[in-house]
Image: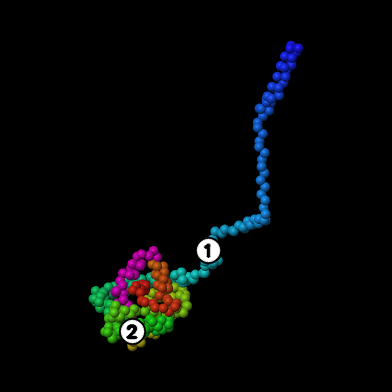
Amino acid sequence: MKAFSFPVLLFVFFAAGCAHSPDPIASLAPPAAPPQVQRVLVVSDSVQIPPTPPEIPVTSETKNVDDYGDIEVPEKVSEEAQGEIADPLEPFNRAMYHFNDKLYFWVLKPVAQGYEKVVPEAARVSVSNFFTNLAFPIRFVNCLLQANFKGAAAELGRFTVNTLWGVGGFLDPASSEDINLSKQDEDFGQTLGAYGLGHGFFIVWPLLGPSSPRDTVGLVGDAFLTPSTYFSPWYAGAGTRVYDRVNDTSLKIGDYESLKEAAIDPYVAIRDAYVQYRLKKVNRKGGNTPAEDSELPRK
C-alpha cells in the first residue's frame, strides 16, 4: 500500500506545480498595448469658417495713394511748368545768338570797359539808379494791372522819395534800412503771364537777345511807358537807351563770360536760363515780386 501511495503523491505534486507555472510561450510575447481612449469634440454652436480672400494683383507701376486709399493719377505738367520751351526756330535763333555774341565781344564789351576806366563805379551806380527811377511808370502800371496794390504803393513811395531826396533819382534812399521800400521788378510780359498767357516759342532777337512772343508783346507795351521813347528827336531817345545799356554792362562785365564758359552749349544754356528766369518772375496771383539782384545776360 505504501509502495502504491508514493507514486500517486509524486504525480499529484508534479501536476500541481505545472498548473501554477507560467506559460513559456505567453511569457515571451510582448505586453498588450493599453486600450486607446477616443476623444470626441462636441460643438454646441455652428462655426463659420471665413472664405479665403481673393488674391490682389500686383502691378509694377508705382502710383501715389492719398489718405483715403485712392490712387491719385498725376496731372500732366506743361512744358512751361517744367521749365521748357518750344524752339521751332532754332537755326534762326542760333544765328541771332552768334550775332549778338560777336556784337558783345567786338563792340559792347570794349566800349563798356573803356567807359569803366573813365567813370568811377560810384558814378556808374548813380546813373543806374537814375534810369531805374526813370522807368517807374513801367513797374507802377504793371503792378496795378496785376492787382498788386501793395507793390504799386511801394513803387509810388520809392519814386517820390528818390526823386525828392535822391537828387532826381541818382541816389536810392528808399532802399535804406530806415525806409526799406523794395523795387518791384514788374513788366508787361509778366502781366500777360499773370493772366495765364504762356511763353509760346523761343526766339532770339538781334540786339535785344532771348525772348518769346509773349515777352515781345511785353516789350512793345513797356516801350509806351518808357519816358525816353517820347524824347525828340528820335535819336535822342535811342542814344539814351544805348547809354543805359553801356552803363549797365560796365557794372556786370564777367557775368555772361562765366555762363558761357561753364556751359557745354552756350545757346542751350541761355535758352534754359531765360525760361527759368521768366518763369520765376511771373506771379500768377499778382503778389509782391521784389526785384532780383542778378539778371539774365541779354546775349
Name the amino acid type tagged 1. Answer: Lys
Q: What amino acid type is highlighted by mark number 2?
A: Gly
- Residue at the front extreme of this rendering: 1
Towards the viewer: 144 or 112: 144
Circle on res. 95:
none
| Residue 117: quarter of image | bottom left
Quote the CA–CA distance across marks 2 and 1. Answer: 51 Å
Quadrant of the rendered image containing residue 295: bottom left
Q: Secondary structure at mark 1?
A: loop
- Numbered disc 2: secondary structure: helix
Queried whether the magenta region covers residue 18, the answer comes back as: no
Give the magenta range.
240-265
Q: Quadrant of the C terminus?
A: bottom left
Q: Nearer the viewer, residue 13 or 207?
A: 13
Mark 1, residue position: 63
Q: Identify the residue under disc 2.
A: 157
Q: Main secondary structure of the magenta part?
A: helix
Residue 52 vertical placement versus 128 (above, below) = above
Task: Judge left or right: residue 294 versus residue 14.
Answer: left
The colour mode here is: rainbow
The image quadrant where one finds the N terminus is top right
Q: Residue furthest bottom?
A: 232
Residue 33 falls left or right of residue 266: right
Which of the two residues, 133 or 174, is positioned nearer the viewer here? 174
Question: Would you identify the image quadrant in which residue 27 lies?
Answer: top right
Between 160 and 223, the one nearer to me in the picture: 160
Place of residue 95 in the rendered image (x, y in percent of width and height, measured from the top left): 41, 71
